[in-house]
Amino acid sequence: RGLKVRYNLKGDLVAEDLLFAPSVVSAATEIHGKGELLQTTQRLVRQALDRMEEMQVAEGATLAADLTSRASRLQQLVEAIRERVPQMVSGYRKSLEGKIRDWKLDALMPPERLALEVSMFADRSDVTEELVRIESHLAQVRAAFAGGGEVGHKLDFLAQECGREINTIGSKSQSADISGLVVQFKEELSRIREQLQNLV
């Protein structure tokens, strides 16, 4: 509207009219011949692809460092769970002994029977196999990063397997401490799986 008033122009004036007016838009440099245009285009595409590859490598390195750190945290949680399993069994024994005393069932629960009950509890709540399998999966995660190449799908599979094992540990746990560690493990694993979506 300002241009219409300033230059006393008639009719409707739209942005497209300005683009098609002579000398309004011009190339900064003029490329002569199709061969030169092709070479310039190829050079620019190569530069763009090289830059994109550099960015992907840098992003991959950052992601690998983050995932490796998180896998180390999972290993620490596995070790913490393993340390607390004997405490869970001894806690069960003390709890059972306390109930026997409180309910005055000493005559009905001789020491051999108590030992058997504790042994059966220990068997039911044993998570050794699950912990060993998780550690095996975490070792494979470290090996995958060390080997390089495409690792996204493999890591996603290993994360799923770790999830299955930690769920089993959670269902067997009779300890608030172990249950808390299981929750921490699941939270960390969830963050790992979110990061892995950038790789698969």
Image: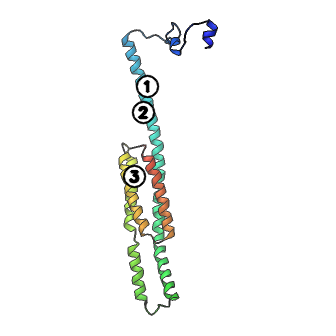
Residue at mark 2 to residue at mark 3: CA–CA distance: 24 Å
Q: Is residue 164 above or below residue 108?
A: above
| Sequence-wise first label, 2 or 3 | 2
Residue 100 or residue 79, whichever sits in front: 100
Mark number for residue 53? 2
Q: Secondary structure at mark 2?
A: helix
Mark number for residue 37? none
Question: In the rendering, at what x and y percent does residue 35 appear?
Answer: 36, 12
Residue at mark 1 to residue at mark 2: CA–CA distance: 10 Å
Q: Which three-letter amino acid code belongs to the residue tagged 3?
A: Val
Residue picked out by circle 3: 141
| Sequence-wise first label, 1 or 2 | 1
Residue picked out by circle 1: 47
Residue 95 or residue 20, whichever sits in front: 20
Q: Which three-letter amino acid code belongs to the residue tagged 2?
A: Glu
Q: Residue furthest bottom?
A: 107
Residue at mark 3 to residue at mark 1: CA–CA distance: 34 Å
Badge 1 vs badge 2, beta-carbon distance below 8 Å: no
Question: In the rendering, at what x and y percent does residue 11 appear?
Answer: 55, 9
- Label 1 crowding class (10 Å Cα cut-off): few <14, some 14-19, many 20+? few
Q: Secondary structure at mark 1?
A: helix
| Residue 11 visible, this angle | yes
Residue 192 or residue 40, whichever sits in front: 192
| Sequence-wise first label, 3 or 1 | 1
Residue shown at 47% from the left, 66% from the top: 81
- Label 3 crowding class (10 Å Cα cut-off): few <14, some 14-19, many 20+? many
Residue shown at 57% from the left, 7% from the top: 10
Residue shown at 44% from the left, 41% from the top: 60
